[in-house]
Image (cartoon, helix red, strand yellow):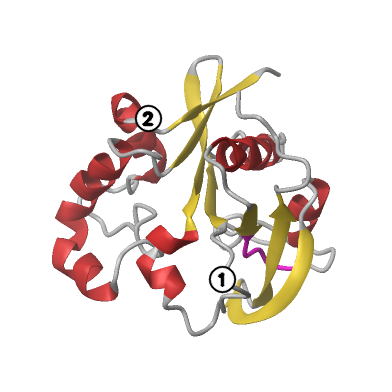
Amino acid sequence: MTVEVHPATADRFDDVASLLAPKTPGASACWCLSPRLASAELHALGSAGRPARMRELCGEDPPPGLLAYLDGAPVGWCAVGPRAGMGRLTRSRTIQQVDNLPVWSVICFVVKAGYRRRGIAARLLEEAVGFAAGYGAPAIEGYPIDAEGTRVNTTLAFVGTTSLFEKAGFERVAETRATSAGRIRWIMRRDLREAPIAAD
């Protein structure tokens, strides 16, 4: 299986939409904006305004995430970017800021049904590390759950698991006060200063 990963640039917005849009047209969906925007802005956009806001983000540098393709079809999404640019995350009372290092954050994974458990998320995380390093990030963080060896509903594990991050060279830094799927979320970090990884 050959997986290609590309930044979610404006010309790939339709592929982003194929992964983030709700299955039922008009239904509410996060569009991976919740960690990035203040609650007031997110509420003001409403369901109808969120796709356009994500399209705008795809036109910025850096783009808001990465897309995984299999045989040319989009099958996975990873939201990643500077933590400082994620308003709601920086003000979070449950996911604390460890220090003043200008880290990048991996905040979400989406893998299309039928393609899960094939290593898509692992490949996206690997590419996210290189993506952040290519922009000069000193470190990259994630906020996954500790599944404790049990199987977790994939919908609720959108933040990733500690084992996924550990396999990518991340280390546990601290427990947070946040949970997902009833599991505690951890701050996990990979330092990029000593052995930077060049982006493809």
**Tally of numbered discs:** 2
Up/down of 74 relative to 124, above or below:
above
Taking the image as shown, residue 77 lies to the left or right of residue 56, namely: right
Which amino acid, mark 2? Answer: Asp
Up/down of 80 relative to 95, above or below:
above
Q: Main secondary structure of the magenta part?
A: loop
Q: Which residues are magenta?
A: 142-146
Taking the image as shown, residue 29 lies to the left or right of residue 1, namely: left
Sequence order check: which comes first, mark 2 or mark 1? 2
Q: Position of residue 196 (x, y in %)?
A: 71, 39
Task: Depth check: give the residue in front, 29 or 103.
Answer: 103
Q: Secondary structure at mark 1?
A: loop
Q: Which residue is mark 2?
A: 15
Could you say which quadrant of the image residue 88 lies in?
A: bottom left
Residue 145 covered by magenta stretch: yes
Which residue lies at the image location 64% right of the left edge and 79% below the top edge?
176
Give the class, few, some or many, for how many residues have Cα within 10 Å of label 1's Cα (few <14, many ≥20): few
